[in-house]
C-alpha cells in the first residue's frame, strides 16, 4: 500500500515538475542574484547525492532539534522515500525549549513550517537566510506573533537558528535546488528528538502536550519516510488527514474551528500506532524507574552545538527575558481516543485523533 502511494507521488511530482518553469529568482523579482546564492554544491556533497541515489533537484525535508543543536537535511531518493543526507551542528539558537509566542521573546519557533521560494533570501545581512514563515496557521490560530524567524548564517541568533556561513551556503543550495519546479519544502522544528527518554526527562514541562502533538507528525515521517501532509483545525496540528472512503466532499480545514471528520491512510496509521505503543511502554517504564526530571527553565538564552563552543566562546549567555515557563499559555485539553484501554496510553497519550479505516 505504501509502495503504491510512493509510485503515485513520484508520478505526480514528475508531472508537476514538467509543467512548471524552474525557480529563477527565489523572491527577488528580476534582480540579479549574488554569486553566493547561485553557488553549486561542493563536489563531496554532489558525490554523496549520487551514492545515496538522490537526484539533485528532488524534494527535501529539514528537521531541527534544539536541545541537540542539530539540523538534519533529508532528501528523496529514487525510490520516492526520504533518507537522511546530512546532519549539520547548529552554531546558535536562542530562547529556551518550547515554541515562540510573541515578538521579542527571543524564542526560536517549534512546529511544522512550509518554505516557499519567496521565503528564500539571497541578500541577507546574515550571509544567506531561509525564512521559516512564522507565524504559520497553527501559530495564528493560537494568537502567536513574531516575524523574520530564520535559518541563517553568521552564528548569531535572536529567535533564529544560526549556522556558520559555510553551512548555510550548503543548506541554502540544497533548498534552492529542491525548489526547482516545486512550490515548497517542509521544515520540522522540535525541542529535542522526541524519544521516550527525552519526553520522560521533560515530563513536568508545561509544553509536554504540545510536544506530544508534534510527535504524531514526527512518527508519521519516521515510520513511512514520506513527508507528512500537515493541516490545522481546532487550533491543533493534524497529519495525513484524508476524507473517508464514502465521503463525497474534500476536506476543508479551518485552523480555529472544529476539525472535520477525517481518517488517516490505514498503512500510515498502522505504522505510526505501532511506534506510538512501543514508545508508550518505554515511557511508562522510565516513569516507573523515576528517571531524573530536566528543569523547565535553563536560565540560558538558547544554546549551541558543543562542536562550536571553543570556536565561539561566550555566545550563549544568560537569558534576557523572564523565566520562560512563567508565561506559557496552555493549549486546550485534547480528548484521548484509546481503543485498547492501555494504562500506558493514559500516561503517554492524549493527542491521537486519527481513526483506522
Image (spheres, helix red, strand yellow):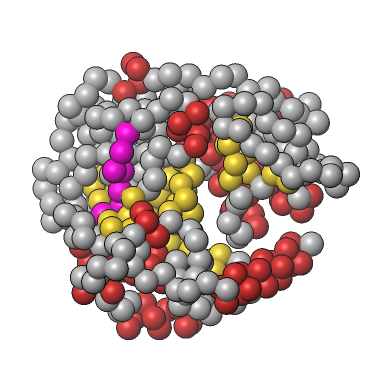
Q: Give the side of residue 190 with respect to residue 227, left or right.
A: left
Q: Where is residue 252 shown, x and y percent of the image? A: 68, 39
Q: Give the side of residue 197 with respect to residue 171, left or right.
A: right
Q: Where is residue 23 shown, x and y percent of the image? A: 41, 69
Q: Give the side of residue 212 with respect to residue 70, left or right.
A: right
Q: Give the side of residue 133 with respect to residue 266, left or right.
A: left
Quarter that holds the C terminus: top right
Front residue of 188/150: it is: 150
> Residue at coordinates 45% horizontally, 73% vertically from top-left?
22
Question: Does 26 sit above or below residue 317?
Answer: below
In the rendered image, is residue 255 in sight? yes
> Residue at coordinates 79% horizontally, 62% vertically from top-left?
1
> Residue at coordinates 43% horizontally, 62% vertically from top-left?
73
Front residue of 20/191: it is: 20
Q: Is residue 179 magenta?
A: no
Question: Hey, which residue is sitting farthest top in the picture?
Answer: 326
Question: Does 184 sit above or below residue 351?
Answer: below
Q: Where is residue 225 shown, x and y percent of the image? A: 60, 60
Q: Where is residue 240 shown, x and y percent of the image? A: 66, 47
Tell me where the magenta segment starts and ends, as one range: 146-152
> Residue at coordinates 17% horizontally, 27% vertically from top-left?
320
Question: Does 94 sit above or below residue 51?
Answer: above
Question: Does 107 sit above or below residue 16?
Answer: above
Front residue of 351/103: it is: 103
In the rendered image, is residue 278 in sight? no
Amino acid at each position: 500500500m505504501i509502495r503504491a502511494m510512493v509510485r503515485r507521488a513520484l508520478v505526480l511530482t514528475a508531472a508537476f515538475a514538467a509543467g512548471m518553469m524552474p525557480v529563477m529568482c527565489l523572491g527577488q523579482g528580476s534582480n540579479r542574484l549574488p554569486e553566493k546564492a547561485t553557488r553549486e554544491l561542493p563536489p563531496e556533497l554532489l558525490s554523496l547525492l549520487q551514492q545515496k541515489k538522490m537526484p539533485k533537484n528532488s524534494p527535501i525535508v529539514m528537521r531541527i532539534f534544539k536541545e541537540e543543536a542539530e539540523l538534519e537535511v533529508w532528501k528523496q531518493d529514487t525510490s520516492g522515500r526520504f533518507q537522511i543526507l546530512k546532519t549539520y551542528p547548529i552554531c546558535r539558537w536562542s530562547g529556551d525549549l518550547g515554541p515562540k509566542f510573541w515578538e521579542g521573546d527571543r524564542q526560536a519557533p517549534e512546529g511544522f513550517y512550509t518554505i516557499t521560494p519567496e521565503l528564500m533570501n539571497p541578500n541577507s545581512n546574515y550571509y544567506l537566510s531561509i525564512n521559516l514563515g512564522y507565524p504559520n496557521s497553527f501559530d495564528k490560530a493560537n494568537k502567536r506573533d513574531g516575524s523574520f524567524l530564520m535559518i541563517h548564517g553568521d552564528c548569531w541568533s535572536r529567535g533564529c537558528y544560526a549556522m556558520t556561513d559555510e553551512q548555510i551556503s550548503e543548506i541554502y543550495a540544497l533548498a534552492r535546488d529542491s525548489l526547482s519546479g516545486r512550490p515548497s519544502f517542509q521544515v520540522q522544528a522540535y525541542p529535542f528528538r522526541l524519544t521516550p527518554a527525552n519526553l520522560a526527562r521533560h515530563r513536568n514541562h508545561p509544553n509536554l502536550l504540545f510536544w506530544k502533538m508534534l510527535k504524531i507528525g514526527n512518527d508519521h515521517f519516521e515510520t513511512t519516510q514520506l513527508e507528512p501532509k500537515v493541516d490545522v483545525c481546532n487550533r491543533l496540528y493534524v497529519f495525513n488527514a484524508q476524507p473517508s472512503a464514502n465521503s463525497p466532499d474534500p476536506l476543508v480545514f479551518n485552523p480555529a474551528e472544529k476539525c472535520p471528520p477525517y481518517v488517516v491512510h490505514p498503512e500510515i496509521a498502522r505504522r505510526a500506532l505501532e511506534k506510538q505503543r512501543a514508545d508508550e511502554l518505554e515511557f511508562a517504564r522510565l516513569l516507573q524507574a523515576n528517571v531524573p526530571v530536566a528543569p523547565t527553565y535553563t536560565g540560558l538564552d538558547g544554546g549551541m552545538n558543543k562542536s562550536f563552543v571553543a570556536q565561539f566562546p561566550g555566545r550563549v549567555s544568560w537569558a534576557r527575558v523572564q523565566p520562560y515557563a512563567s508565561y506559557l499559555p496552555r493549549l486546550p485539553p485534547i480528548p484521548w481516543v484509546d481503543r485498547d484501554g492501555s494504562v500506558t496510553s493514559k500516561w503517554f497519550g492524549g493527542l491521537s485523533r486519527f481513526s483506522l479505516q
